[in-house]
Image: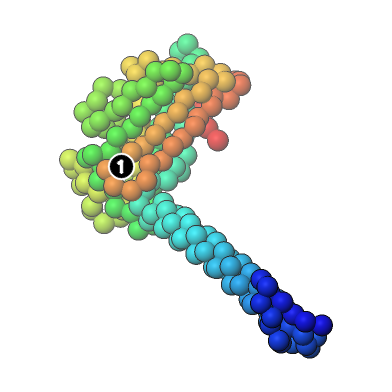
Amino acid sequence: MVGRVGGVDVPFLRDEGAKTALMAVVLLIATVLVATIMAAAVFSLNRDLADKSIGASDEAVKGIAAGLERVHVIGVRGDTGEIIRLNVTLRASYGASVALDTLVVQVTGGTTMRSLFPMNGTSGSALTVLRDQDGSMAPPLGRMKVGDLAIVTLDLEVLGFPMAAGDRLHLQVLPEEGHSTRLDLRAPEGFGEARLVPFE
């Protein structure tokens, strides 16, 4: 059998063993090429996932290390039966040092939002130190660190957000540095005779 390629006589194509070896080499090269492309795709995907994972862990560390956490929220009912005041107890999360004099609280009810700043100078709001572990929260308003507790008091009547049973209110506590703390509050469906209403 004569092997011809493009009208040219190619002697080794006459040998069946040589043809088989050439096909095996071409198949091996194709297999290596496909494997290389697949490996590059897998490595690229792994790198992208690793970058996303590192970004997510960095955000989580920032969240743990730089912000305020909700301890509990108590609503106080007025003579009309509505909740007219909220006492929001906050603590600093691990590693945090939050400047209280620049703390902003945003209150949203329905489509209305009010930003309260400074906390002890805005009508309808106050910040009270409950526990100051190291004296860092000294007046006028210092820094809140781990172990410290403070209460943000919101006069909902003055702010225009009194809460009836089932009403919703959204609070966002925005420190100058670190992550914000968002509280989505929903008043219980019934208060009974209780003047103090705990929020879950």
Name the foreground residue: 21 vs 179: 21
Hey, which quadrant is residue 41 in on the image?
bottom right
Quarter of the image with the C terminus is top right
Q: Is residue 14 above or below residue 7?
A: below
Q: Residue at the far left: name it.
A: 140
Decide: is 26 above or below 184: below
Extreme top residue here? 80
Q: Viewed as shown, does residue 192 lie left or right of 101?
A: right
**Percent position of residue 96, x then y:** 33, 54
Instruction: Identify residue type, mark 1.
Output: Pro
Question: For residue 104, what is the image quadrant?
Answer: top left
Is 23 left, or right, of 166 in this rendering?
A: right
Q: Quadrant of the N terminus?
A: bottom right
Residue 118: quarter of image: top left
Residue 191 visible to the viewer:
no
Can residue 107 be seen here?
Answer: yes
> How packed is label 1: few (under 14 Cα within 10 Å), some, or many (20 or more)?
many
User: Along the line of sight, which residue is nearer the eye, 149 or 106?
Assistant: 106
User: 35 or 165, which lies in front?
Assistant: 35
The number of discs equals 1
- Kindly identify the residue that appears in the image at 64 percent across and 69 percent down: 34
Image coordinates of residue 146 in percent, x first then y, are 35, 55
> Where is residue 199 shown, x and y percent of the image?
52, 32
Position of residue 49 relative to residue 19, above or below, is: above
Residue shown at the point (61%, 20%) measured from the top left: 190
* Colour convention: rainbow
- Image location of residue 192, percent across then percent down: 60, 20
Residue in the image at 44% along x and 42% along y: 70
Q: Report helix, strand or loop for mark 1.
A: loop
Residue position for label 1: 175
